[in-house]
Amino acid sequence: MTMRLTTPLLALLLSVAGTANADTLYKCTDDSGVVLYTNQKGTGKNCTVLSNDQAISSVPGSRGATRNASPSDFPKVNGETQKNRDGDRRKILEQELATELQNLDKARKDLAEQESIRNGNEQNYQRVLDRLQPFKDAVALHERNIDALRRELGNLK
């Protein structure tokens, strides 16, 4: 009976020892200076055990975004010119917004018109939905454009 208990216990201990050994990572350097990372110590000389806590990555870490100062000969714009440019930008965005609002009204009218039409071959309601989907997509597109233009106008100084 003792033999029956010790055999599974011995197998369990060997498997735990095997997995612990598999977690060990070695950094080995050969005679020519080539570095090899492995979990088998016998593959090279000058092997050192790396800590399990140490992060190992083949990708170099990212350095924070460094801002370089503008060169002294970099062209600068005076305040009045920049103000004029900002004014022109605002004017263009307002024109685009007005155009998108008109396009949205037209797309909504087209959608309403298509919703009121019932073709004889559309006994299946899915056909009606399929026919209306491009008009619904056009309305959604113009609504997204209007939201984006309003956000852009809100970001202006």
Image (cartoon, rainbow, N blue to C red):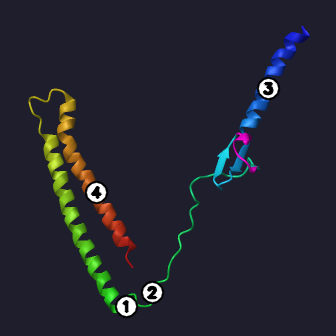
**Mark 1 vs mark 3, CA separation in Å:** 77 Å
Image quarter (top left, top right, bottom left or bottom right) of the C terminus? bottom left
Residue hosting label 4: 143
Q: Is residue 2 left or right of residue 42?
A: right
Three-letter amino acid code at the position of disc 3: Leu
Label 1 close to label 2 by CB (< 8 Å): no
In terms of sequence position, does the residue under pointer 4 or pointer 2 come before the other? 2
Q: Which labelled disc corresponds to residue 71?
A: 2
Q: Residue at x 33, y 91 (%)?
A: 80
Q: Is residue 50 visible?
A: no
- Marks 1 and 3: which is nearer the front? 3
Label 1 close to label 4 by CB (< 8 Å): no
**Magenta residues, start to end:** 40-47
Q: Is residue 9 visible?
A: yes
Q: With respect to residue 84, does 104 lie above or below?
A: above
Q: Residue at x 19, y 47 (%)?
A: 135
Q: Nearer the viewer, residue 53 or 26?
A: 26
* Label 4 neighbour load within 10 Å: few <14, some 14-19, many 20+: some
- Marks 3 and 2: which is nearer the front? 3
Q: Residue at x 73, y 48 (%)?
A: 45
In terms of sequence position, does the residue under pointer 4 or pointer 3 come before the other? 3
Residue hosting label 1: 79
* Label 2 neighbour load within 10 Å: few <14, some 14-19, many 20+: few
Q: Is residue 151 left or right of residue 64?
A: left
Label 1 close to label 3 by CB (< 8 Å): no
In terms of sequence position, does the residue under pointer 1 or pointer 3 come before the other? 3
